[in-house]
Image (cartoon, rainbow, N blue to C red):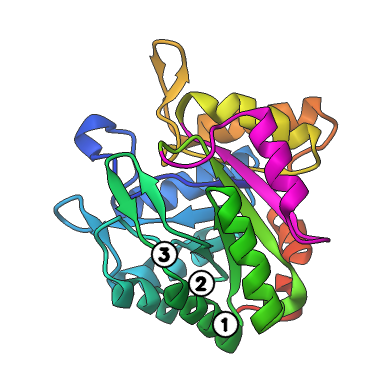
Amino acid sequence: MITVAPTGAETPKASAPALPTRLDELVSTARACSAAGAAMIHVHLRDDHDRSCLDVGRLADAVAALRAETDLVVQLSTGGGVSDSFADRLAVLDAEPDSCSLTCGTVNFGDSVFANPWPLIVELYTRCRERGILPEFELFDLGHVATLHRLLDEFGPPPGGRVHADLVLGVPGGLPGTTSAVVAMVAALPAHATWSATGIGRSALPVALAALSAGGHLRVGMEDTLTFARGRPVRDNAELVERAATLAELAQRPAMPAARARAFLGLDAGVTAG
């Protein structure tokens, strides 16, 4: 399963003009990435001033537009930007996506702090369970895996029973984007959990190759990396999805279509709220 994360909340469009920050750009990107092999899209929105936007109305419009134009699994970020309030991050679920990200702990994020205290984690998870929205557990460090175990032990499995995590590696402040980090994280995951891996920046390829060899899935996109090769910027998100699909084909694990991804995640059994 290939997830594309096309925008993110931090890089300004002026620094990366190919970032899809308007809704029409996001939809066009989603169509191109679906054709290239993506099955899920991880969505951040920007406001009219290129800042992280968690406006529920805009998020609902984006979910509707993506569903109308593609069959991708639509996942909204509840992380937003590092300065977004907890209340706004919780309200993301009101847009009724198929899935949402749920980060399992606080982490230094370059010079900033991405705050995810236990009460916020619990509230997000409780609301996901109540609304039938599938959480994807974002894990930046081994301590986050321990928090995931605690969450499942205290509150039970997610809607549909699928525990799916994304290993986010290479963030300054979290685990590095290396093969050994992938192996350590996977060894600590709950039994029967499935997982994708994200390599930030120059770790994108090493993490992708390690994930494919270890039975994991992939997340790629301009949220996570803006350089395709040394000295050469990424052309667009579809280029990163195409490369991931090629690697998956070489590993004899071809890209999963969206319909199969829905079944894989349990979404075809009516898990979603939308």
Circle 1 residue: 273
Q: Residues within 10 Å of mark 3 (few under 14, many from 20)?
A: some
Is 106 positioned to the left or the right of 186 in the image? left
Q: CA distance from mark 1 to mark 3?
A: 24 Å
Is 109 positioned to the left or the right of 161 in the image? left
Q: Position of residue 23 (x, y in %)?
A: 33, 56
| Amino acid type, residue under disc 1 in the picture | Ala
Is residue 175 covered in magenta? yes
Secondary element at image label 2: loop
Q: Are marks 2 and 1 in contact (CB under 8 Å)?
A: yes
Q: Position of residue 93 (x, y in %)?
A: 44, 77
Q: CA distance from mark 2 to mark 3?
A: 21 Å
Q: Which quadrant of the view contains residue 244?
A: top right
Secondary element at image label 1: loop
Circle 3 residue: 116
Read off the magenta span: 173-200
Q: Residue at x 73, y 38 (%)?
A: 183
Assign the C terminus to one quadrant of the image: bottom right
Q: Is residue 256 visible?
A: no
Depth check, mark 2 against mark 3: the one in front is 3
Q: Are marks 1 and 3 in contact (CB under 8 Å)?
A: no
| Amino acid type, residue under disc 2 in the picture | Pro
Secondary element at image label 3: loop
Q: Earlier in the sequence, mark 1 or mark 3?
A: 3
Q: Nearer the viewer, residue 58 or 155?
A: 155
Give the answer, above or below, for where 223 lies relative to 83: above
Circle 2 residue: 97
Q: Position of residue 162 (x, y in %)?
A: 74, 69
Q: CA distance from mark 2 to mark 1?
A: 7 Å
Q: Nearer the viewer, residue 198 or 226?
A: 198
Q: Residue at x 23, y 31 (%)?
A: 15
Q: Residues within 10 Å of mark 1 (few under 14, many from 20)?
A: some
